[in-house]
Image: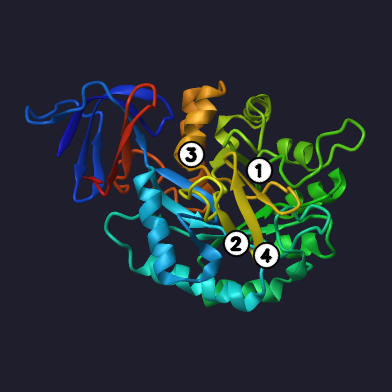
Amino acid sequence: MFYKNARIFTSDFRFHTGAFEVKDGRFGRILPDTVPEDAVDLGGATVIPGLVDVHSHGNSGADFSDGSLEGLRSMARWYAQVGVTSFAPASMTLPYDVLEKAFATARAVADEPQEGAARLMGIQMEGPYFSYKKRGAQNPDYLKEPDFEGFKKLYDGCGGLIRIVDVAPELPGAAEFTEKASKLCTVSVAHTDSDYDHAKAVFDAGATHVTHLYNAMPPISHRNPGVIPAAVENPNVRAELICDGYHIHPAAVRLAFSMFGGERMVLVSDSGRCAGMPEGSKFELGGQDAWLRGGVARLADGTIACSAASLWQCLVNAVRFGVKEEDAVRAATYNPACAISAQAQIGSIEEGKFADFLVCAPDYSSKTVYLSGKAL
């Protein structure tokens, strides 16, 4: 089937008006020279790749760390409805046996995809190798120093599905852990009180990602620059950003894109089970009580926790905040696919990749989601 008269975000990260083909659930020719007369006319709509969320804990009452098969399948269906066609759920700081169960559940979902649900393409292991001071909403009872053997056991147990593992650079053995773990997956700096030198050492050892930039890390200081400048000056490092309108001020969103460039930014939702739940809901987050009030999830002590937003909302916000449209779309599609080493299958409108795409109004006020070329 061909679609014509569309404003298409193509693999050169620009918009081009033209047509594209979907064949057997995958993209065929993009911007072909000739188009059949019976091609579907999209009326000038904007077409972008399906969104890829590499940092989301849950939605609609379910959390990845619950280890529930039906809960994770329910999450995947919700993601698809809001435009996220691929995801890598994020765990919390919890005991290894709890993580092992959750990771085994992810393996089962990845191995048996459901129709009408987002593809599970990996796992982000967020914790337990974190700083106590910058733990944020992570449970302090389960924090650990970097432990490659423990990580490797979890990695092997889920068949290598862990695609991102997080670590605080100032912890003992962080650079050595990074050097080993980076041979298996992406290593990300997160929940850290690190100075510049420790952060640089971990980036030099192979870390190529920063989890939710600005949040749970020191601010930039001209005398103690910390993590962020160390990440900016290393061209191999990408940075996540929670663009829900609460975690980060719009000016700081624009600053992040200016510092890293559109090719190194990764929009994430960091949503918890509260996403899709009603205002005022009480919910559990990593063994701690949390509440959704005024659109913001907080622990009992007022600590801001996960978000209640979808990645689609974060994309719309980024454009509304003044981020260049092409950069925002890339940050929600291709860049996260690269972070989980899935760019050969997803993340761009390119021949041979899964035909996961969104047909959007020019102002992103509405969308229709397509998975493997089929509209939801």
Closer mark to the observer between disc 4 and disc 3: 4
The part of the image, by quadrant, that contains residue 4 is: top left
**Residue occupied by mark 4:** 93
Give the x, y percent position of residue 120.
42, 59
Q: Amino acid at mark 2?
A: Glu
Number of other residues with Cα within 10 Å of mark 1, as a class: few under 14, some 14 to 19, many 20 or more: many
Towards the viewer: 342 or 63: 63
At label 1, the amino acid type is Val
| Image-based side of 296 in relation to 330, left or right | right
N-term mark: 3 or 1: 1
The crowding category of the residue bearing disc 3, from other C-alpha atoms within 10 Å (few below 14, some 14 to 19, many at least 20), is many
Read off the residue under disc 2. Answer: 284
SS for tag 3?
loop
Q: Please identify, in this view, whether the residue under mark 4 or under mark 1 is nearer the observer.
A: 4
Count of all numbered marks drawn on residues in the image: 4
Mark-to-mark CA distance, 4 and 3: 25 Å
Viewer-nearest of labels 4 and 2? Answer: 2
Residue drawn at point x = 49 percent, y = 74 percent: 104
